[in-house]
Image (tube, helix red, strand yellow):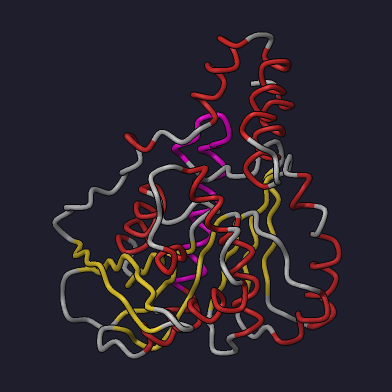
Amino acid sequence: MDQRIINLFDEYTHAPLTRKEFMERLVKLAGGTALAIAALSVLEPGYAAAATVAPTADDLQTEDVSWPGDGATVKGYLVHPKGKKKRGAVVVIHENRGLTPHIKDVTRRVTQAGYLALGVDALSVLGGTPADEDKGRELIGQLDATKNLNNYLAAFAYLRARPDCNGHIGAVGFCWGGGLVNQLAVHDPKLDAAVAYYGQQAKAEDVPQIKATLMLHYGGLDQRINAGIPAYEAALKAAGTKHELYVYEGVNHAFNNDTSSARYNPEAAKLAWERTLRLFKEKLN
């Protein structure tokens, strides 16, 4: 697919570009309405194929849970292996459209690797993640940033208090969630491992507060997010923060999302996930 179309879609999903403006520009780039609709069908997620780990997998238990947040009750999707063994826990942080079927599947993938996993629904304080992705993105913009951060910090506290958690906590986030992972690393000195996929970087002046080991994954074609890499990397090195930074050349923002075939890159996604699980094994077991 024409990279200009992918860049336009990224602008639409992350900037104040209306659906009407997006479609008008997409029609021009694609060369007609029919071609634009065909391109859109490839760009937008196909959740029918989202489940790589079945929700009813025999070795997993899933449940809807809640905990007190900042002025509201927060809800999430908890997945844990069967058995009574204490395990490290991972908070899975969604993209800018809410706790979608894809992110629930990622949560199950984390558990299948041996961890207690909690997919937080940041939009639960506003009624929950809607099926309409445009509405989800709209609701994300209505979240109070401070309260939202506190709600995720409360998710860490909820997991640490569970009898099936060994006390070690990690976080992995994608896009909007990747940026939040960086912020959580700044604000929770007890966080053990923080993995951010193509997420906005923390401010350089906040980096000395980070105690977690960071792992940062970026797509080489993601100019919007990658613009913040040099300053962040320099600050991490200056502060002596343990981190691993990977740029996967020739791949786009959201390269891990296997429900969006235009941007998904199986090779980069596989390698990044292997590295992610290796960090969790080192820090959470």
Q: Where is residue 105 in the image (x, y as percent from the top left)?
A: 35, 51
Q: In which quarter of the image is residue 67?
A: bottom left
Residue 274 within the segment the image draws in magenta: yes
Q: Is residue 267 above or below residue 90?
A: above
Q: In this view, does 234 lie above or below 239?
A: above
Which residue is found at the position 78% from the left and 44% from the top? 223
Q: Position of residue 42 (x, y in %)?
A: 51, 25
Q: Where is residue 197 in the image (x, y as percent from the top left)?
A: 60, 56
The quarter of the image holding the C terminus is bottom left
Main secondary-structure element of the magenta-colored stretch: helix
Q: Compare residues 13 and 244 and report the one nearer the observer.
A: 13
Q: Compare residues 69 and 227 and report the one nearer the observer.
A: 69
Q: Compare residues 151 and 175 and report the one nearer the observer.
A: 151
Q: Is residue 119 left or right of residue 30?
A: left
Which residue is found at the position 18% from the left and 53% from the top? 57
Which residues are drawn in magenta? 258-281
Which residue is found at the position 49% from the left and 54% from the top? 273
Residue 20 within the segment the image draws in magenta: no
Which residue is found at the position 61% from the left and 33% from the top? 19
Q: Is residue 119 above or below residue 152?
A: above
Q: In this view, does 82 lie above or below 151?
A: above
Q: Where is residue 70 in the image (x, y as percent from the top left)?
A: 48, 83
